Amino acid sequence: MVGADRRAIPVEELTLEDAAAELEALAREIAEHDRLYYRESAPRISDAEYDALRRRNEEIEARFPELVREDSPSFRVGAAPAEGFRKVVHARPMLSLQNAFEEDDVREFVRRVRRFLGLDEAEPVELVAEPKIDGLSVTLRYEEGRLVLGATRGDGTEGEDVTANLRTLRDVPRKLKGDAPAVVEVRGEVYMRHDEFRAMNEQREKEGLPLYANPRNSASGSLRQLDPSVTARRKLRFFAYSWGELSANVAETHWEFLERLKAWGFHVNPIARLCRDVEEAIAFYRTISEQRAELEYDIDGVVYKVNRLDWQERLGMVSRAPRWAIAHKFPAEQVETVLKDIQIQVGRTGALTPVAILEPVTVGGVVVSRATLHNEDEIARKDVRIGDRVVIQRAGDVIPQVVSVVEKARPADASPFVFPDHCPACGSLATRTINPATGQEDVVRRCTGGLICPAQAIERLRHFVSRQAFDIEGLGRKHIAAFWQDGLIRGPGDIFRLHERKADLIVREGWGEQSAAKLLEAIERRRRIPLDRFIYALGIRQVGESTARLLARHYGSLEAFVEAVEAAGDPESEAWRELVAIDQIGPSVASDLTAFFAEPHNREVVEDLRRELEAVEPLPATKESALSGKTLVFTGTMESMTRGEAKARAESLGAKVAGSVSRKTDYVIVGADAGSKAAKARELGVTVLSEQEWLDLARG
């Protein structure tokens, strides 16, 4: 009996032999329709007919589970709902991109590349220009050509395992075509086309369900469904554009790598272009800007990447962004609405930030009802008043901000806004201090209430559990505020003692045994955390993610970090000189660090946390070398590479780069016209290396 004939037989009447034969035929047939639809863009059947084939396959497998095949189409849809997504540490970080908003920013990017690599103006710098898809970044890991793992970007270091969901995307090959290295990580963007987004919303409207705001949010939400069958119904797409871990080199240029991706079976954006120079790349941006509305998917700019991979390797990265790529963003969409009120928020450092409360309006597909006004000087400069009609935009297509006032539409009774000089949360005096580094008045007014200010306490706790810090699932902004108000949590250490209050958690409105258990499990998973995350979580002024990583890498352990910064409280001490000598750490940041640890309460918080958890040393350099853990100072002009490239190379080999020489310096590398640093090194007995000696050491 042939497949078509069998389909006339109700599933409950199929014999075991007929069911096995039909499942084999369905697997072949559905795979062929997948190929025609997604690879050849030439479907032979309608979506309804295709869905009928899949339903038939699922019904047979449900009745004959012992017959489910390894190549079954249901592996793309039918996994049972998961309890949650496990965390995945990326083999190589998924980097973010620096942004450019003006054409001159792009030209300056290329000039920086030239300076870093020491190129003269005659040397061409080819760029690959790719539309920046407004979707969700993911990575796909293949071993021996087979898909074994799929994960979201997360914070760039750690994402979520969404392998089962990514398997449902017909753009994602489960097996690579042709030859490929033993390990291949392919990175790209999951997105939803405009027509499929509209169709989904039309169906939701018919069913009386709330509509989705935009394709990007829909793609993100669809990929993170606990039931992969829900993801499968959303018709998500995937464009590949980069790589993570590769066990062998596969190309000499980025453009060649895109060709390899296509050969392996991936979709690469067809309008990407290889540009001979920066002006050709900018011309491509202008063309795409004009065509943006005609594309079948959302883009928010163009990404430029240095084409030569050996140059990419030399350029490396700064903070969490590569030096060899930049995103040229489109101008933000601007709309008008009414400013209904100005509210003052108090942040974790006591900063009073004005927030515009707006008549809700849609900007770039997102409904906006609040926007930042930055500070009191900005309000005065723009003369923003309650009741004004204002122009707003989403800066970088993300953060809503008030751009200007439509003065001709101003109400007759609108009066200038008077910024408060007392904290709205605790009533303490709010002042603008003098910045010791610049000698100028700070633009930010801060509450002087400190420990008695509930707003600061809550915001510090929210920062502590934020995604870039301890990243505790289930402990959101509302929960932190409620737990603080009710006395369950007063300081960071209390979070790790919540298991002692489980009985109180369970009886809270909206909670129960299961939700409390999940939260406590999430907290337990964070009792061991990288040192840089720990430092960032403390919420020290001017200590962001990048600075926290520098400090963690330099001091190596929490004990060494705390001891050194406390000792640096004396500006005449060796500890202070060592702190300010760390590359990219200056007197201003050092002052904020020492001021934090000079406060007894802050030291108590750190000691309390040390009793509850372990802050582990940073991940080692990508490979061990003779420079691992050594402190280096560069002085003079390098001949074989620029100073910036030399510093980047040293850091990639596990070295610490300082800006001044001290007794803790291991090597001073002297180039041409070396000055006082070389003399200081000889005075202190520090080893001095020539450029060639340093290169020999770096090569190991």
Image: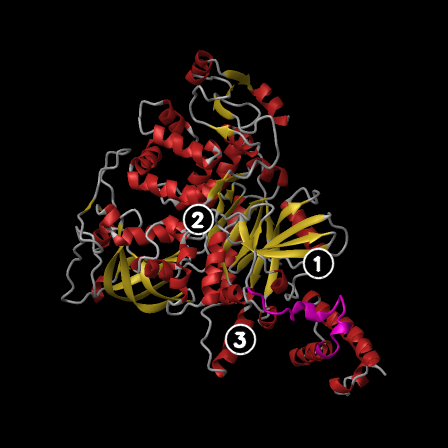
* Magenta region: 62-83
Q: Please report the residue visible at 57 percent of the width from the left and 27 percent of the height from the top.
A: 627
Cβ atoms at labels 3 and 1 below 8 Å apart: no
Q: Amino acid at mark 2?
A: Ala
Q: Earlier in the sequence, mark 3 or mark 1?
A: 3
Counting from the top left corner in percent of width and height, residue 341 is at 23, 64
Q: Secondary structure at mark 3?
A: helix
- In the rendered structure, the answer to whether residue 680 lies left or right of residue 592 reads right
Kindly indicate the quadrant of the structure image that contains residue 167. Answer: bottom right
76 is within the stretch colored magenta: yes
As rendered, which of 332 and 484 lies closer to the eye? 484
The answer to whether 613 is drawn above or below residue 302 in the figure is above
Residue 41 appears anywhere in the view: no
Determine which residue is flagged by label 3: 200
Query: For residue 67: magenta?
Result: yes
Question: Which SS class for mark 1?
Answer: loop
Residue drawn 54% across the image and 42% down it = 324
For the residue labelled by badge 2, is the local secondary structure a helix, a strand or a loop?
Answer: loop
Residue in the foreground of this view, choosing between 68 and 527: 527
**Which amino acid type is shown beneath numbered disc 1?**
Gly
